[in-house]
Amino acid sequence: MAFLASALLGSITLIAAIVPAINIPGRPGTEPQLYPAPPGYLLPWAGGEIQDVTQGEETTFTHNGLAAYAYDFGLSYATVVASRSGKVVMAYAGSNSGGCSRYYSNSTNYVVIDHGDGTAGLYMHLAYNSISVNVGDVVAQGQPIAISGETGVTCSDDGRDPGPHLHFQVERFEPDHYLTQALPVAFDDISNNSGVPIEGRAYASGNYGKGQPQKIALTPYRVSREFNPRAVPLNADLIPKEPVAIPTSTPTQTPTATDTPLPLAESLITPIPTNTRVPDATPTPEPTSTPTPPPPTPAPPPSATATPAPPTNTAVVPATHTPTPPAPTNTPAAPATATATATP
């Protein structure tokens, strides 16, 4: 009996030792907490890879206002991973257009991950149809979520052409608003400058993901940074606005398009009235017919005048032969005529 009890106790001990090792799903304490997310941000690309900071926080270019504490990382169509765990609350991947103009503000692809503490992570300018997570998914830190791209307001160094990169910012979480006020952030895998990225420098990511060995030492930054944005934009046309303000860019285009057609429409309306069509159809033929008759009418008088003209010419001839009038004077002699009359 004692043997059986000892064997049973040994079996229970063995099972207790094995269960945590095999990590049975659903067993309390075996899964790391993902939402609400534990504190700490890591750079949003695959661990071990190096990327540069193309635009830092508080700039006069585009990182001011709502994006005052945002960062642009030079990921050119590279894998984007979650900087911190949380729940996907908004995502859009249907755009394939972008450029250096506020006109493209509503053309960006993005993912918003709620951290469960009033903050969220915004990942913007993602490539078309490249998002690998869905709204409602709970994602772990380091999990791939999309591919970086150049959708929305993206500018290269010359400020004219689209440039692929990742725009990342930690922001206040507001339902149904993917772009809200950015908040100061520090990354645990940046060992200097209190974890704040510096524009123009390159950094190796320590975001290896769940179950992967951590090859880069992390420095937890738990002290919140002061919120005091001061940068002012030099070009307001490039400043990203929250969705409510995006239509402002559309009206700017619409009026311009409308202003151009208006003169054309007015010019088309002017010829439409009877003034243009009537003169072409009715008035033109009538004037032609009326002027034609008058010339024929004056023509007869010249013909009548032409008839007397010969007599005039004839009279001129007799006038020239005026010295011979004695013969005509003798010809009309009355006796000859009278004789002819008396004979009957």
Image (spheres, rainbow, N blue to C red):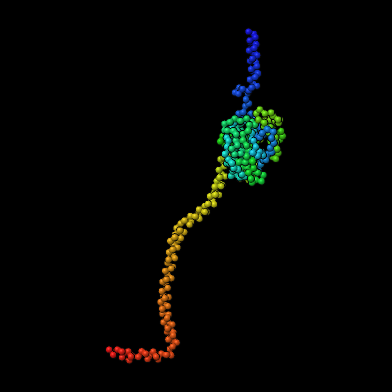
Residue in the image at 44% along x and 60% along y: 281
Residue in the image at 42% along x and 83% along y: 314
| Location of residue 145 (image quadrant) | top right
Quarter in which the C terminus is drawn = bottom left
User: Does residue 228 show up?
Assistant: no
Q: Position of residue 133 (x, y in %)?
A: 59, 33
Quarter in which the N terminus is drawn = top right
Residue in the image at 63% along x and 23% along y: 23
Tag count in the figure?
Answer: 0
User: Does residue 200 show up?
Assistant: yes
**Outermost residue, top side:** 1
| Location of residue 142 (image quadrant) | top right
Q: Is residue 313 above or below residue 122?
A: below
**Outermost residue, right side:** 192
Q: Position of residue 310 (x, y in %)?
A: 42, 81
Nearest the eye: 175 or 132: 132
Nearest the eye: 6 or 190: 6
Residue in the image at 59% along x and 30% along y: 138
Q: Is residue 100 above or below residue 88?
A: below
**Outermost residue, left side:** 344
Q: Position of residue 190 (x, y in %)?
A: 70, 34
| Location of residue 198 (image quadrant) | top right
Q: Position of residue 309 (x, y in %)?
A: 43, 80
